[in-house]
Structures are given as C-alpha cells and as structure tokens.
Image: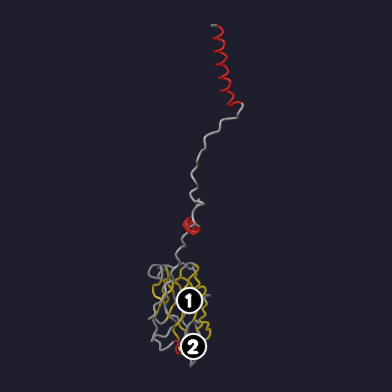
Amino acid sequence: MRKKLVMLLLGFSLLWAMALGTTACGGTTAAPETTSNPPANSVPDSLPANEVAEIATLEVQPEAASPETVTVACEDYLRFCVTSEISGAVNAAATAGMGGNIDTCTAWAADGDARILEMPMMQGAGEDRITVALTRIAAYTGPGSYELQNTVTEGIPDMFPTIEAAGRAFGYGDGATAVVTVAADGSGTVEATGLVEIPSLTVSEPDPTARVDFAMQWTCRDIE
C-alpha cells in the first residue's frame, strides 16, 4: 500500500515538472496576435493603380483659394473713370464714373488758343463719400503739365481742387500746391499737397493744423 502511494506521488510530481518545463525551458508563451486598424489615409496594396491614384487625389485636398478682390469698373456710358486718393488728416480712396459735356476725348485735350479747361469731378464716391469740386486750368493751350496759380496779376486764376471726405472738407491754403497733367488722349492727373481744412456742413471750426495730400487720376472714353 505504501509502495503504491509513493509511486502515485512520484507520478504526480513528474507530471507537475513537465507542466512547468513547457514555459520555463521552452521560453515564454507567445502573446496573442493583435490587429491594429490601418491608418485613415492608408491604401490597400491590392487596389488597382488607377483607384490608388483616385484615392490619393481625394485624400489631399488643397485649401480653397480666397476669393479675389472684385474691382468695381466705371460705367461704360460715362465719359470719365476717376480715382481719388486722400492722405493725411483724412485717409480715403474711391473710384467712380463721371459724365462730361465734351465732343471727344482728343478734341477736349487738343492744342489750341488759351482756354479754360475743367477737370473731371467726383460726387459722393466710396465709403467716405469723396466729393471733388471743380478744378480748372484757366489758360490751357494743349497737353502737358500746369502748376495751378491761385492768385494772378492778369486774367483769371486757376482753381485748386476742393475735396470733401468723411464729413471734412479741404482746399487751397498757404503753402498748398497743385499740378494738373493732361495727355493727348484726354486722360490726366491732379497732384495736390498741403490742402488745408476749411469749414463744411459738419465742421464749423476746422482744425488749423489739419492738412491732406490729394491725388486724382482719370481716363477718358469716347461714347458712341
């Protein structure tokens, strides 16, 4: 009986040792395989080349381009297209079309005897409601540049530009200068510096130190 018990214990011990040997001598038990989800932008190798290219195009989407700034063109039925820029005590700019009681652009700007030539104007244009009152050359004789004279000893004086923007008005004052250039095709420019603030509907007591520079350019078109 004792011999049978000893043999049973030995057999049990042998089985236990064999069970331990499977992990200790044979190495660690392999961990179960794990599967990971493929990256969102991955493309299976089994797809045809044309489908791979199509997926790549869809995955890389360029940012939408910002809309281009829309430039407001002057109306075709108006003679002049005028752009005005003001800098200094007031900063503003605008482009607008203006009419003109002339025959043709070249006839308006042509050489000839001294005569009054009135420049295009502007009325309440842009966000700052720019208005440019009458500017004139008193003795125009043909295309070229004319330095405006506010005071003359003979004849009539030229007329400096008077402008209004953002509720404030500016015109001729001490130290102000203005040059008007007219081309043979009727286009031209006005370059004025040191215009002083003058009374307006909204400003009864203008700032004596306020100054602006003013630039205006225009093109002329013949209307059928």
Please say if 91 is above or below 135. above
Which numbered circle lies on residue 216? Answer: 1
Of marks 2 and 1, the one in the foreground: 1
- Residue 13 sits in quarter: top right
SS at mark 1?
strand
Q: Position of residue 165 (x, y in %)?
A: 42, 70
Screen quadrant of the C terminus: bottom left
Please say if 29 is above or below 57. above
Residue density around tag 2, few if under 14, some if 14–19, many if 20 or more, within 10 Å:
many
Mark 2 or 1, nearer chain start: 2
The residue wearing badge 2 is 140
Which numbered circle lies on residue 191? Answer: none
Q: Position of residue 21 (x, y in %)?
A: 59, 24
SS at mark 2?
strand
Q: Is residue 62 visible?
A: no
**Foreground residue among 139 and 55:** 55
Residue density around tag 1, few if under 14, some if 14–19, many if 20 or more, within 10 Å:
many
Kind of residue indicated by mark 2: Tyr
Q: Position of residue 106 (x, y in %)?
A: 46, 88
